[in-house]
Image: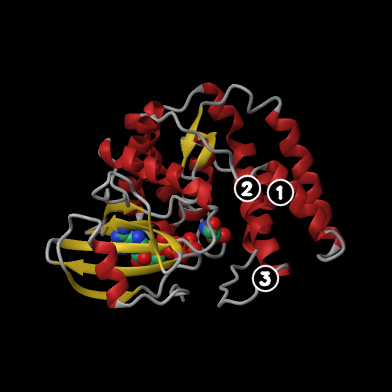
Amino acid sequence: MSVYTRVEADDLRALLADYAVGELEDFAGISAGITNTNYFVDTSLGRWVLTLFEQVDEAELPFFMQLMDHLAGHGVPCAHPVARNDGGFLSRVRGRPAALVYRLNGASVETPDAQHCRSLGGVVAEMHRAVASFTPAQRNARDLDWISAAAERLEGMMPAEEHAVLADEIAFQQAAAGDLYAELPAAVIHADLFRDNVLFDQNRVSGLIDFYYACHDYLLFDLAVICNDWAFDDDEHYCPTHWQAFMTAYTRRRTPDAAEVAAWPAMLRAAALRFWASRLIDAYFPMSGEVVHIKDPAPFKRLLLAHRADPPALAP
Ligand SMILES: Nc1ncnc2c1ncn2[C@@H]1O[C@H](COP(=O)(O)OP(=O)(O)OP(=O)(O)O)[C@@H](O)[C@H]1O
Ligand SMILES: N[C@@H](CCO)C(=O)O
């Protein structure tokens, strides 16, 4: 359920008066998504998506808008905001901060094949090149400090044996941060490129969406998040052809350096840890007052343990 705030035609007419996008023709709430309220909005001049930000820290929104605008300006297919007549990207609808974004064609795929992965590899490499000239930065809201604080909250709530794995992995990642990760290339990354955040049209990426965890961090972290979600099936079986297809396309545009190759097994673990921890927090401390879709933390624990034993290579 993604409509937390109900929007009426009059709200939209008032909003659209601030943009040069024509007259309202139709609109409908979007049922996918968890965090924000999203509406499809059709006007006489095009098709748009209106997002009402329900949970994002308002002070962070200009960063996300600038990032999407920058990437789109550099040819990266992605959701990006429409500028208002006064040049800004943010509006207010029903008391919520809101943005009108260009509507992309296509849909996300639950079960990607190698062709989807190949197309994604090219787009992610383009994104990693385009961020080199993007100067605003924002820290990772789900960094190791956040994960450590999460582990403290979870102590005594989750099974002790599992908590010990969590604590042990945090210690490993703290050591890696001062050593293995010290020389890694860093820039603004997406940080949440799961299958539901990529739209495809005819097996080609039509756009990346949901940049609201974007932050300054290691480029390799993006690759690890993608490998964990796109190259492992729902039973955590590794699909080498998926990862091969992704990396073949990626390395045509950007070659990982030696430090990235060395840090890869640890970074796969960091990405598994990040989503294990956030899903544990969502499961043990569910947000009240809304319809909440809790994602199962267990696959990321299993993936973490699998990576400790036998991580796949960065460039297979
Ligand atoms: N620019 C866009 N063009 C077309 N469809 C979009 C666009 N942005 C979002 N959508 C559609 O809206 C749905 C919900 O968007 P999104 O995943 O960003 O929701 P959210 O609630 O903000 O995020 P999350 O699901 O991570 O909590 C997407 O699955 C997609 O179908
Ligand atoms: N992609 C995340 C949720 C949003 O950050 C997950 O699957 O846990």
Q: Upstream in the sequence, badge 3 or badge 2?
A: 2
Q: Amino acid at mark 1?
A: Ile
Please rate how many residues cluster around mark 3, counting C-alpha atoms within 10 Å: few if below 14, some from 14 to 19, many from 20. Answer: some
Q: Is mark 2 within 8 Å of ligand 2?
A: yes
Residue 44, given in percent of the width and then of the height, sits at 12, 66
* Residue 226 vertical position relative to residue 199 in the rendered view, above or below: above
Mark 2 nearby-residue class (10 Å; few <14, some 14–19, many ≥20): some
Q: Residues within 10 Å of mark 1 (few under 14, many from 20)?
A: many
Q: How is the image coloured?
A: secondary structure
Q: Amino acid at mark 2?
A: Arg
Residue 142: mark in rendering: 2
Is the distance from the Cβ of mark 1 to the nearest ligand 2 atom less than 8 Å?
no
- Spatial CA distance of label 2 from label 1 is 7 Å
> Is 206 placed left or right of 310 in the picture?
left
Return the x and y of residue 255 as percentages of the image width and height: 41, 27
Asked whether the beta carbons under mark 1 and mark 3 sit within 8 Å of each other, the answer is no
Judge whether residue 108 can be spotted in this image. Answer: no
Q: Which residue is mark 1?
A: 147
Secondary structure beneath dot 2 equals loop
Disc 2 and disc 1 in contact, CB within 8 angstroms: yes
Q: Residue at x 43, y 28 (%)?
A: 135
Q: Please name the residue shown 67% across and 70% down the image.
A: 286
Query: Which corner quadrant of the figure contains ligand 1?
Result: bottom left
Identity of the residue drawn at 26% across and 58% down: 104
Q: Position of residue 305 (x, y in %)?
A: 70, 52
Q: In the rendered image, which residue does mark 3 sit on?
A: 286
Count of marks, rendered view: 3
Relative to 8, does residue 87 appear above or below in the rendering? above
